[in-house]
Image (tube, helix red, strand yellow):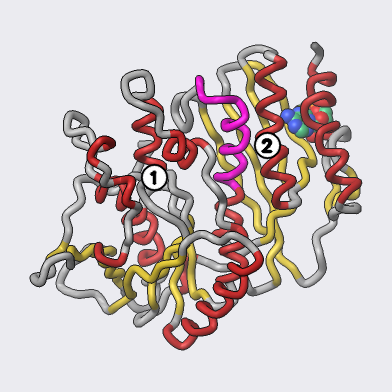
Amino acid sequence: MKEFELIQAYFSQRFESLLIQSGQHGVILGIGDDCALLSPCSNHELAITVDTSVADRHFPSDAPAYAIGYRALAVNLSDLAAMGATPRWITLAITLPEVDQDWLLAFSQGLADLCFEHNVMLVGGDTTKGPLSITIQAMGEVESGKALRRDGAKIGDKIYLAGELGLAHAGLKHWFERSKSQQHDDLIDAYLKPEPKIREALTVAPFASSAIDISDGLMADLGHICERSSQKNTVQAHIYLSKLSLPQVLYDGSQVDDKTLYNPIDAALTGGDDYALCFTVAESQEAGLLSAYTDQSEQHQLAQLTCIGQVTHPTASLDKVICWDDRTETQQPYIVSKTGFQHF
Ligand code: ADP
Ligand code: MG
């Protein structure tokens, strides 16, 4: 199969129906020329992000091809969500070790299903041979001046989470142990097929002061909000274990492994790969946020929304984020064993 035929069969044809279904979708010219030509809406800014997923680094290479396609896109759409942007177009640069048609069919199906769900169009890319790696560039639009940035958190703001923590980390552990233990498909799915919190983000955006998606763990990512929001006044985030409402399945004895020192609280705080949305809201905006979220939940299934803490003036501690263990009367800082995934 030649490169051109491959692109036709697995990428351009699959998306033609979406283009027809949704009208022009801002695409003047899609796959097939030297560049795509796109037409953004007026009074909007373009939000652009790119993420590479390398086999056996960002996902297990023996994961189902459908999930690999779905996940590679989900992590990018999650970044658009965290800016309060509406996703519109993607490009795909894929490096394949060989042409495996069954694999490509499933991969492009995973990619297309998530694109269709959010009305996102594939408009170009690049196809090369080599160790499996997938780079997706995602482009979205946000009304001028309305993007949800990391640097907007203010002292007194409440800290909210849309989504659940710890499931993906537990899922990855179960993926590697799946031959030894019983299947935990729901947990494995939380890792392999994360749901980008797009509807959630668009619902909270008018009320939020800052936002980030949780890819490297709550402690690390909330730390980024504090860092970026400390340009004028230094801010600190205080979160509370009692409010995190960790999913019961994380505590389920049969799923906790002493040998690997699996700790559900640490998994939730630092495990990463959750793609939950963390954001801050001024107290004066809270009532509006909660009522908008309830209204939207009646039409769409939205992720669980939880207030987990507050932004304050810095205390004696130099940490950007302090997690309080308030499960007993004498509240004390909870010390996590590690803080977020780092590549280098
Ligand atoms: P060029 O050599 O000009 O970069 P290519 O032969 O790489 O062109 O690609 C031909 C067309 O197919 C381009 O429009 C490109 O955007 C598109 N394309 C290539 N690979 C992919 C892919 N994996 N997914 C979507 N479009 C692709
Ligand atoms: Mg090219």
| Residue under the image location 84 percent in, 36 percent down | 31
Q: Quadrant of ligand 1?
A: top right
Residue 149: horizontal and vertical position, in percent?
Answer: 52, 66
Q: Residue furthest left?
A: 330
For this view, does 32 lie left or right of residue 151? right
Q: Which residues fall within the magenta stretch?
A: 62-76
Q: Earlier in the sequence, mark 1 or mark 2?
A: 2
Using the image, determine if residue 256 lies above or below residue 265: above
Q: Residue 207 sits in which quadrant? A: bottom right
Q: Nearer the viewer, residue 106 or 28?
A: 106
Using the image, determine if residue 322 lies above or below residue 10: below
Q: Amino acid at mark 2?
A: Leu
Q: Which residue is mark 1?
A: 167
Where does the C terminus fall, quadrant-wise?
top left
| Residue under the image location 61 percent in, 75 percent down | 295
Residue 103: horizontal and vertical position, in percent?
Answer: 65, 19
Is residue 68 covered in magenta? yes
Q: Which residue is mark 2?
A: 111
Residue 25: horizontal and vertical position, in percent?
Answer: 85, 54
Is residue 224 covered in magenta? no
Residue 195: horizontal and vertical position, in percent?
Answer: 55, 48
Separation of residues labelled 1 and 2 (CA atoms): 22 Å
Where does the N terminus fall, quadrant-wise?
top right
